[in-house]
């Protein structure tokens, strides 16, 4: 079993469906309420565990009912929670999500304990760094913690994969520490300052990322699949055609599946094809972690 260290956020998504969004100062009566476990770090950890990875998760929750439920969920998925800390002074991360009749959403995230995941917390997980075949991170925790994790991985000679979501400009010194970066189209455009309005611009945008020092680039393209580019090769992999029901966490499931396939030793093409099939299944189901497929569902 490949051993994956996922470092990142854990949130609880609180979703209310409503006919329309309220105006400032207005109260409206909405429809059904849903509570989903979420947060990009936790979503990717669950996806990797369901695909067959042995997952260590480094995250921080608050001392409240949401943090407790999140940790129970991780245990249920077979994730090692030894490095999930509960901060007694902070609230757990939550996302308040309103979805209108058109399916559009408005989201406010209160990061809570996620914002307190510090470089010092990573030093408490040295054993997991040493045991990992691969380390995966995203951007819902402080950027200095991302940089420190990448430096630790580099010092140990471990592959470090960054899913740069939600989009934000990255410090230059981070790029040479990355084995792989996996932006979606919006994130790739923001990171490079280049526009990505047609597939012909993919090589240019990927090369701009490579020139910053990252070794390999995968740009995820939603229903169009994913694009790979490194110094030796570039190609696009198509995603299976599916009827999308809820695209939440498609990227998280893609990344979780991808890192397990890579850590198992698969080559780029079969690993990306596997991840595309996992992401496509996720969009046919509701929810974030709930939509992640199991390995048996991905056998050709
Ligand atoms: P994000 O969720 O981060 O915005 P994408 O939308 O690019 O990322 O989706 C990630 C992956 O999930 C894609 O590369 C693809 O494999 C799969 N995927 C996403 N949307 C669809 C879709 N509508 N049909 C099939 N596969 C999809």
Image (cartoon, helix red, strand yellow):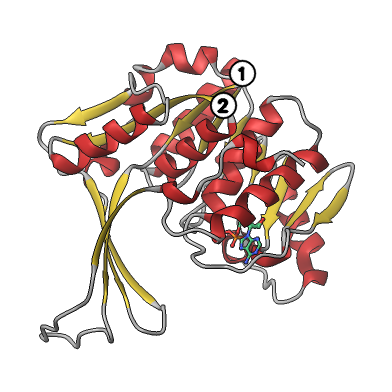
Where disc 1 sits, the SS reads loop
Label 2 and label 1: CA atoms lie apart by 6 Å
Q: In which quarter of the image is the C terminus?
A: top right
192 horizontally vs 286: left or right: right
Can you tell which mark lies on residue 53?
A: 2
How busy is the neighbourhood of tag 2: few (under 14 within 10 Å), some, or many (20 plus)?
many
Q: Position of residue 50 (x, y in %)?
A: 53, 34
200 horizontally vs 11: left or right: right
Can you tell which mark lies on residue 210?
A: none
Q: Quadrant of the N terminus?
A: top right
Considering only vertical position in the picture, is 46 above or below 275? above
In the picture as drawn, the residue positioned furthest to the right comes out as: 232
Image marks 2 and 1: residues in contact by CB distance under 8 Å: yes
Is the CB of the residue bearing disc 1 within 8 angstroms of ligand 1?
Answer: no
How busy is the neighbourhood of tag 1: few (under 14 within 10 Å), some, or many (20 plus)?
few
Considering only vertical position in the picture, is 73 above or below 229? above
Number of dots carrying numbers: 2
Of pointers 2 and 1, the one earlier in the residue sequence: 1
Q: Where is residue 280 in the image (x, y as percent from the top left)?
A: 63, 56
Asked if residue 143 shows in the view, the reply is yes
Is the CB of the residue bearing disc 2 within 8 angstroms of ligand 1?
Answer: no
Q: Position of residue 141 (x, y in %)?
A: 37, 43
Task: Tell which of 292 and 299 is nearer to you.
Answer: 299
Res. 96 image quadrant: bottom left
Residue in the image at 28% along x and 87% along y: 20
Asked if residue 178 shows in the view, the reply is no
Which residue corresponds to mark 1? 1
Considering only vertical position in the picture, is 80 above or below 27? above
Q: Position of residue 118 (x, y in %)?
A: 32, 32
Residue in the image at 36% along x and 42% along y: 9
Quadrant of ligand 1: it is: bottom right
């Amino acid at each position: 079993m490949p051993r994956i260290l996922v470092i990142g956020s854990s949130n609880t998504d609180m979703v209310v469906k409503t006919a329309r969004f309220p105006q400032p100062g207005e109260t409206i009566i909405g429809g059904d309420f849903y509570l989903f476990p979420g947060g990009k770090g936790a979503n990717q950890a669950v996806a990797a565990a369901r695909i067959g990875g042995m997952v260590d998760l480094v995250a921080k929750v608050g001392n409240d009912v949401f943090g407790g439920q999140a940790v129970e969920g991780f245990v249920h998925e077979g994730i090692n929670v030894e490095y999930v800390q509960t901060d007694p002074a902070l609230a757990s991360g939550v996302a308040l999500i309103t979805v209108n009749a058109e399916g559009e959403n408005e989201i406010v995230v209160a990061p809570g304990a996620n914002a307190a995941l510090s470089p010092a917390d990573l030093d408490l997980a040295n054993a997991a760094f040493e045991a990992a075949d691969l380390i995966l991170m995203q951007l819902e925790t402080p950027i200095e913690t991302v940089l420190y994790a990448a430096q630790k991985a580099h010092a140990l000679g471990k592959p470090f994969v960054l899913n740069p979501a939600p989009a934000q400009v990255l410090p230059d010194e981070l790029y040479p520490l990355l084995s792989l970066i996996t932006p979606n189209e919006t994130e790739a455009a923001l990171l490079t300052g280049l526009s990505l309005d047609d597939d012909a611009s993919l090589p240019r945008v990927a090369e701009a990322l490579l020139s910053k020092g990252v070794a390999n680039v995968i740009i995820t393209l939603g229903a169009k699949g994913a694009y790979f580019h490194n110094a030796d090769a570039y190609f696009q992999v198509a995603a299976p055609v599916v009827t999308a029901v809820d695209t939440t966490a498609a990227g998280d499931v893609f990344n979780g599946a991808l890192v397990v396939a890579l850590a198992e030793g698969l080559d780029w093409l079969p690993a990306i094809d596997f991840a595309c099939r996992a992401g496509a299944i996720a969009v046919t189901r509701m929810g974030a972690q709930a939509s992640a497929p199991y390995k048996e569902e991905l056998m050709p």
